[in-house]
Amino acid sequence: MRKLTLPIFALLLFTSAALAEGGFYGDAPDANHPWAIHDMNRPQPMRVEPGTFSSQEKPGAPPSDAVILFGGQADEIAKWQADKTPAEPTKWEVKDGVLQCVPGSGYIRSKEEFADCQLHIEWSAPSKVEGNSQGRGNSGVFLMGQVEIQVLDNHNNPTYADGFASSIYGINPPMANALHAPGEWQTYDIVFRRPLFKDGQQIDPGYITVFVNGVLTQDHTPLEGGGGHKSRSKSRTFPDKGPLKLQDHGNPVRYRNIWYRPLPKRVTEGGEYSRMSEEATAAKRSEIAKGIREDAGKLEGNAKMYRLLESLCYADDAAAREAGVAAAGQFVAELQATPKDKLESKKGTTLQFQKAMDYLVKFKVLPEDFAPKAAVTEIVKASEWDKKK
Ligand code: MG
């Protein structure tokens, strides 16, 4: 069964892609979406070479575009500084490829400053178990130096839930306790979005998603100001960027394999993912239309006609409309002048043209009574190309 299903599935995919290549395929751009559905004008995703997963023995390799904050080299301590006296080097130590908290030496902060990110960090609580609740293997990952994702040895160690390992401290407990035993490496994969404000109003509370050892523990949790100790935090502005801070809470917690990838802007700050504002959509549609017209300028014949007409789906333009409409008129005039016995050789191009006409009328780019549409429909009917055989 599997052997039969796969080639059919592959064929369907290929057919869809081939249809989409020529435009006039999925629903046209609208007021909040600058691209059509399945739009081949939409940029291809950026290529990133993936890294490898870590094992207990060995940290994995970061993806190709990661900014590495600590990769196991002793001289990388220079990427960090003491938090309280930033001009001074940190007293934390690098030993055997591991960055270790020296209790009493204070928090450390990265010299690198950033904001919205995918952050990967691995930590290990002391294998010699000492203390309990918040006193056992406590450290913390402070995003932008503002919000703490708790680091704590909660393996058989209860504490208040909103202070648990991978809690957003003082805000939200994790959905699960997926920790390994103390002394083993724990992996945090974090997606962080800072709060956004416009004209003094919060337009996005900011969110954090966390996976602990591959298990989801925070699912797009709103920041509500960022949390803290004892006090309920209130919504507040964040700077544009900040350092990553690691907490000294008096326990010699170890870290390795720390890297981040900056995230693209959200639509509320001019990004192009998901539903966009009408203003941003209109601007983007004009930009796409301009690019298609530039492309049309390098083409000839039908290819040029289709690109000109396609550009009108994004933004109207008198010259492009005039040239596209004239080319469509010429296309049907040539069809009409073709002797009946020679028409069969033009079946493919005729049906392609009809598909484009139907699409452009359906999405009101061309008027319902557009003459070349009526003409091509007539030719298709007379040739019985509209009938399934
Ligand atoms: Mg802590």
Image (cartoon, grey):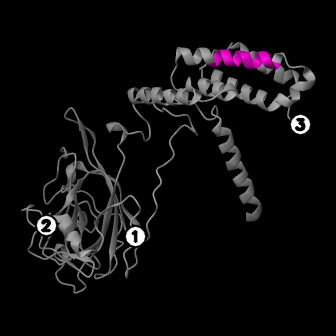
Give the residue pinned by disc 2.
Answer: 107
Q: Nearer the viewer, residue 209 or 268?
A: 268
Q: In front of the other: label 1 or label 2? A: 1
Query: Which range is magenta?
Result: 324-335
Q: Nearer the viewer, residue 281 or 202?
A: 281
Residues at discs 1 and 2 in contact (Cβ within 8 Å): no
Give the residue pinned by disc 1.
Answer: 61
Q: Is residue 194 visible?
A: yes
Residue 81 in the image: x percent, y percent? 14, 65
Residue 389 circle label: 3
Kind of residue sitting beneath label 2: Tyr
Disc 3/disc 1 C-alpha distance (Å): 56 Å
| Mark 1: secondary structure | loop
Which quadrant of the figure has residue 337? top right
Q: Nearer the viewer, residue 332 or 236?
A: 332
| Mark 3: secondary structure | loop
Q: In front of the other: label 3 or label 1? A: 1
- Residue at x-position 57% and y-position 26%: 297
Disc 3/disc 2 C-alpha distance (Å): 76 Å
Look at the picture and state if 153 lies above or below 10: below
Magenta-drawn stretch contains 162: no
- Residue at x-position 71% and y-position 15%: 329
Q: Bin the neighbour count of mark 1 within 10 Å (Cα to Cα): few under 14, some 14-19, many 20 and up.
A: some
Q: Residue furthest bottom?
A: 128
Residue 338 in the image: x percent, y percent? 86, 19
Kind of residue sitting beneath label 3: Lys
Q: Earlier in the sequence, mark 1 or mark 2?
A: 1
Main SS, magenta residues: helix
Which quadrant of the figure has residue 366? top right
Q: Residue furthest left?
A: 85
Left or right: 117 with respect to 163? right
Residue 261 in the image: x percent, y percent? 35, 56
